Image: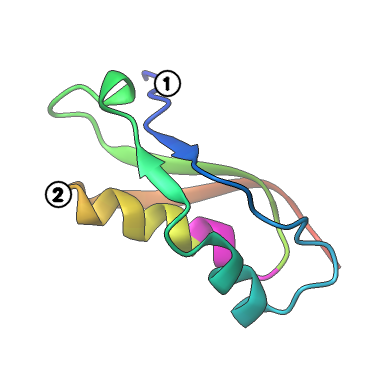
Amino acid sequence: MVVAPALELAGSARDAVGLSREQRMTNLAGRLRFREAGRPPPGFRIVVLDDVVTTGATAAACTRALVAEGFTVSAVLTLLAAG
């Protein structure tokens, strides 16, 4: 296992507390940027780690950003679920 900090939040995003799924997705749109320095090593499976799932918008946005860079995301792992 390797931790690859491949994504960063570019620009400012609103605090997502109280936002709907659609509002959260809009809030993240265009703000996740791939970091070449955090590129996962070839041959490793990609697992997105999210601290908490509220609506799934962050995990979905991270997955889209990685897929746009040519990666296949094997799974999304979360530590907590809200609600």
Mark 1 crowd level (few <14, some 14–19, many ≥20, 10 Å Cα): few
**Residue placed furthest toward the front:** 11
The kind of secondary structure element at disc 2 is: loop
Q: Name the residue beneath numbered marker 1.
A: 3
Disc 2 to disc 1: CB gap under 8 Å: no
Alpha-carbon span between mark 2 and mark 1: 18 Å
Q: Image point 24% across, 55% down: which residue?
A: 67
The quarter of the picture where the N terminus appears is top left
Label tally? 2
Quarter of the figure with residue 37: top left
Residue 57 in magenta stretch: yes
The kind of secondary structure element at disc 1 is: loop
* Three-letter amino acid code of the residue under disc 1: Val
Where is 55 relative to 67, above or below?
below
**Image location (x, y in percent) of residue 75:** 40, 51
Q: Which mark is residue 70?
A: 2
Q: Which mark is residue 14?
A: none
Q: Image point 52% across, 57% down: which residue?
A: 59
Where is 50 relative to 60, above or below?
above
* Three-letter amino acid code of the residue under disc 2: Gly
Mark toward the viewer: 2 or 1: 2
Q: Which residues are magenta?
A: 55-59
Q: Image point 38% across, 24% down: which residue?
A: 4
Whether residue 54 appears in this view of the structure is yes
Q: Is residue 11 left or right of residue 43?
A: right
**Image location (x, y in percent) of residue 23:** 65, 77
